[in-house]
Amino acid sequence: QVQLVESGGGVVQPGGSLRLSCEASGFTFSNSGMHWVRQTPDKGLEWVTFIRYDGSNEYYADSVKGRFTISRDNSKNTLYLQMDSLRAEDTAVYYCAKDRVSGGSFDYWGQGTLVTVSS
Amino acid sequence: QSALTQPASVSGSPGQSITISCTGTSSDVGSYNLVSWYQQHPDKAPKLMIYEGSKRPSGVSDRFSGSKSGNTASLTISGLQAEDEADYYCCSYAGSSTYVFGIGTKVTVL
């Protein structure tokens, strides 16, 4: 069965950096586009970024553009999110999610990892 | 990109039908047949319930159905059951491989 397991969350000071990982199994990772989606209690779900199956293109929400970088290692079945210049408003649970084969939706989600930006 | 508009809460009695609306703009909901709906129980990850506006993934009950008219998409839950009590989020493709979510609707089974 499909499994997505995030790791790397924690507490970081404003202006700091953190790298999240998402280990995938149960499907052909190298054939699937992947997303990061975050969730806060007050704003709900927010799409963050997407990377194509082969890493050829990346797309970002305006709120993180220039600060976050998505990448993947298909040899390790692992997705990454490098988060730099972190702000308090980046505090959220971060989920990795698999792009449905035809695109346009997220058919499997990890359990999420909590990122807290606080001094 | 502004969040899609959903009612904060919707409630119904067991066996009833309820409908959750999701209003966007001509740049997202109105332009693409790529609205999806997610169910989220407390402390759980979201689960895909509807994709491409009206299609159900394998394993999702046929009590869940989706539709769209203009800039507004809708999720209908028929034969409401206690296990349907959860938060529901809509999401639309917004062009250039970007997406926008709704603010979420809390469904309460009375």
Image (cartoon, grey):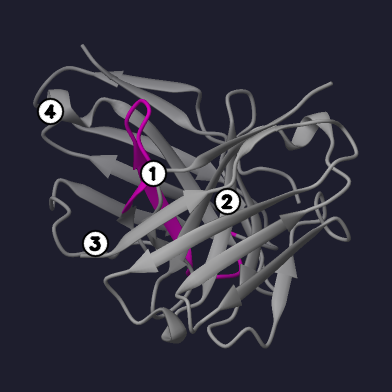
Residue holding disc 3: B56
Mark-to-mark CA distance, 1 and 3:
15 Å
User: Is B9 colored magenta in this rendering?
Assistant: no
Instruction: Name the side, left or right, on which B89 lies relative to B76.
Output: right
In this view of the protein, can residue B91 be seen by the observer? yes
Mark-to-mark CA distance, 4 and 1:
18 Å
Chain letter for the residue marked with disc 2 in the picture = A
Look at discs 4 and 2 and give the one toward the viewer. Answer: 2
Q: From the image, which quarter does the N terminus of chain A lie in?
A: bottom left
Mark 2 lies on a secondary structure that is strand
Residue holding disc 2: A37
Mark 4 lies on a secondary structure that is loop
Question: What label does residue B71 carry, if any?
Answer: none
User: At 23% across and 63% down in the image, what residue appears?
Assistant: B57
- Tell me if label 1 and label 2 are in contact, CB under 8 Å: yes
Q: Report the span colored magenta.
A: B29-48
Chain letter for the residue marked with disc 4 in the picture = B
Mark-to-mark CA distance, 2 and 3:
21 Å
**Tag 3: amino acid:** Arg
Residue holding disc 4: B81
Please check whether the numbered discs 1 and 3 fall on a single chain. Answer: yes
- Tell me if label 4 and label 1 are in contact, CB under 8 Å: no
Predominant secondary structure in magenta?
loop
Residue holding disc 1: B46
Residue A106: quadrant of the picture: bottom left
Q: In this view, does A48 lie above or below B57?
A: above
Mark-to-mark CA distance, 1 and 2:
10 Å
